[in-house]
Image: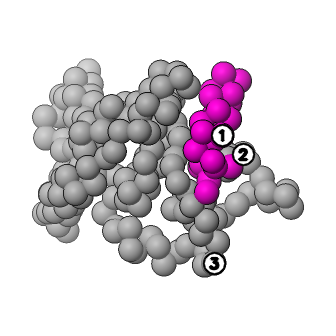
């Protein structure tokens, strides 16, 4: 069955999305662009941060389904780094039984010494805020978008398969100047794509 494509333009955030548009819909014009969260600068997001809470003594852990071996590895890493763990998930509540707002989430990530995550958007904000980070890929939920994002910035080496690798990856410094240069090129390309359809 052949589908009629009536969109003027199609953008996707994963490299695999370009292939899927071609293979499943017969459309060769899809373009990989940045996720919209990357079109804003760190400074623009910093206006949402809670003031007076910065400490830089935390390990921000945003893992949706954390296993016991990873929990133990995080405990060891926090001890080595002299940090306390701030653990958030999409279901975590604060001491009052409430879900932390986006400002709280952004502030905790921004102020952390390092970030351990399996979340696409935690990777995005680690990149924007220049946070040392490690990604524990969950292949059952959204790994393609994370892998595509990291590949775009040459950060594939931030992915680990086990908790035993966390410290070694964190010890490798990220060349933030190179990341920022690539980000600016991708932002310009993504904005030009959007502008061409306005």
- Whether residue 160 sits left or right of residue 78 in the image: it is left
Q: Left or right: 70 with respect to 115?
A: right
**Applied colour scheme:** one colour
Which label's residue is closer to the chain start, 3 or 1? Answer: 3
- Magenta stretch, residue numbers: 57-84
Figure quadrant of the C terminus: bottom left
Q: Position of residue 82 (x, y in %)?
A: 63, 47
Rendered location of residue 45, percent (x, y)? 44, 70
Q: Residue at x 44, y 39 (%)?
A: 170
Q: Is residue 90 visible?
A: no
Q: Which residue is mark 2?
A: 91
Q: Position of residue 93 (x, y in %)?
A: 77, 53
**Residue hosting label 3:** 52
What residue is shown at x 31% (from left), y 63% (from top)? 39
The reply to whether the magenta stretch includes residue 76 is yes
**Which is more N-terminal, label 3 or label 2?**
3
Residue underneath mark 1: 79
Asked if residue 52 shows in the view, the reply is yes
Give the mark, 2 or 1, whose residue is nearer the N terminus: 1
């Amino acid at each position: 069955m052949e589908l009629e494509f009536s969109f003027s333009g199609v953008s996707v955030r994963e490299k695999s999305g370009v292939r899927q548009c071609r293979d499943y819909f017969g459309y060769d014009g899809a373009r990989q662009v940045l996720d919209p969260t990357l079109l804003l600068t760190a400074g623009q997001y910093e206006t949402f941060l809670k003031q007076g809470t910065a400490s830089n003594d935390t390990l921000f852990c945003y893992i949706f389904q954390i296993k016991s071996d990873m929990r133990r590895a995080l405990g060891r890493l926090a001890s080595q780094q002299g940090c306390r763990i701030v653990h958030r998930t999409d279901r975590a509540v604060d001491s009052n039984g409430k879900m932390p707002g986006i400002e709280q989430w952004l502030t905790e990530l921004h102020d952390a010494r390092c970030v351990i995550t399996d979340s696409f958007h935690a990777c995005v904000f680690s990149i924007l805020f220049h946070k040392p980070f490690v990604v524990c890929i969950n292949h059952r939920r959204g790994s393609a978008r994370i892998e595509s994002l990291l590949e775009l910035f040459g950060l594939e080496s931030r992915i680990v398969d086990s908790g035993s690798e966390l410290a070694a990856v964190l010890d490798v410094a990220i060349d933030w100047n190179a990341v920022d240069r690539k980000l600016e090129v991708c932002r310009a390309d993504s904005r030009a794509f959007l502008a061409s359809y306005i």
